Image (cartoon, rainbow, N blue to C red):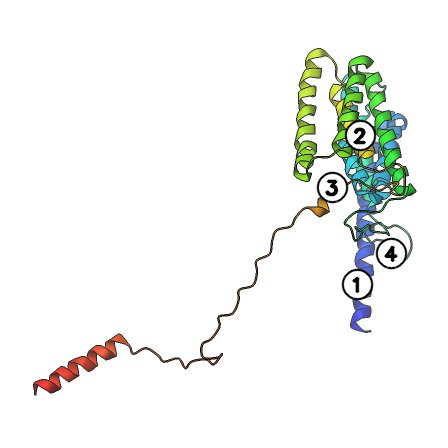
Amino acid sequence: MSVAEAKRQQRKKDQRNLLMFRAGMVGLLLGMFGWMVRSSLLEASVFLAIGAAYSFLVWRVASQSVRAVTVMSWSLMVNFWTLISIDNQHLLAVPASGPWFVGILAGGMAAGSVWLGPHAGAEFAPKNKRRPDADGKYSGGRRLALINGACAALLLGIGTAAIVLLSPPMPAGAVLVASFFAGWMLFRFPPALPARNGLVLLGTPAVFVVLVILGGTLGLVALPYSWAYGVMAGILIGGRHWAGDRLGAPRPPFNSQHKRRRRRKPRKKRSTPSGGRSQPHLPAQPFRAAAIGGLKDKAGSGR
């Protein structure tokens, strides 16, 4: 057996072991879930299945668009926090946040591997990895437009359902609409890339925390969730072209266009004198030898 064949066999063996490990982890999660909710297994399994399907689609389908998978990965935890608020108010017959969390873990682990075919056990990766064109922009298409549009519609639908369940519709609905237009304008008419990223990564969570405090004080629990769902949907709609030749293409600026750190230039070699010929190196006479020679000279002259 050649070295290349041995490496190939070892890689397949490692992939099978990884696949068995992930299958065992999924089975362990489901077993613990079944034991903990055995009294209401059927009702809780509904939220488990929804969470698993949601997470699986996020990592398998939405991953074809970088912005879509980024926003939808944020929504996993926003959905979890929303369900915690729903559980605290006992609006459903069974707890929903726990089964949802187990479902997104199981669905994420299932989506991260290839389960069938010759590449079973390998890490899942989109077939067509998107790269920028010569002008630095990214291409689009109906598929990308459909993915981002469906994700935005889903987020608005979840936000509307949270408003109906948690708060009086009018104040939370106004926050949902305002946050949608805020996210849309931020990506439709974006500022410089550092400013836009700062507003998304720092400004959005800061407003969320303020609305959590304000909503808890006024009894409007859905205010922060309305803000989060609206901003996420607005980012997906405002950050993409929806008509013309660039249908489905993302709008700049892109993080990949950010200037990288300048590399240090290599130091130039020192030029040698006399036309490039190296001069012979003459070792310096040691100080001690020079001193001894001077003493000898003095002694000889005194004789």
The answer to whether marks 3 and 2 mark residues whose Cβ atoms lie closer than 8 Å is no
Q: For numbered disc 4, what is the local secondary structure?
A: loop
* Alpha carbon separation for disc pair 1 and 3: 43 Å
In the image, residue 33 sits, relative to residue 302, either above or below, namely above
Q: Quadrant of residue 167?
A: top right
| Residue holding disc 2 | 234
Residue that carries the numbered disc 1 in the rendered image: 10
* Residue 117, numbered label: none
Residue shown at 10%/86% (left/top)?
A: 301
Q: Residues within 10 Å of mark 1 (few under 14, many from 20)?
A: few
State the SS at label 2: helix
Q: Are marks 1 and 3 in contact (CB under 8 Å)?
A: no
Q: Label 3's element?
A: loop
Residue 253, labelled with which disc? Answer: 3
Amino acid identity at mark 3? Pro
Residue 238: quarter of image: top right
| Quarter of the figure that contains the N terminus | bottom right
Mark 2 in CB contact with mark 1 (< 8 angstroms): no
**Could you tell me which residue is drawn at 82 percent across and 54 percent down?**
122
Q: CA distance from mark 3 to mark 2?
A: 16 Å
The reply to whether residue 163 is visible in this rendering is yes
In this picture, residue 208 sits left or right of residue 265? right
Q: Which quadrant would the C terminus be assigned to in this image?
A: bottom left
Sequence order check, earlier mark of 4 and 2: 4
Counting residues from the start of the chain, the first of labels 1 and 3 encountered is 1
Q: Earlier in the sequence, mark 4 or mark 1?
A: 1
Q: Earlier in the sequence, mark 3 or mark 2?
A: 2
Amino acid type, mark 4: His
* Residue 69 position in % (x across, y down): 80, 39
Look at the image and tell me whether residue 32 can be seen: no
Mark 3 vs mark 2: give the one in front: 3
Report the residue marked by disc 4.
119
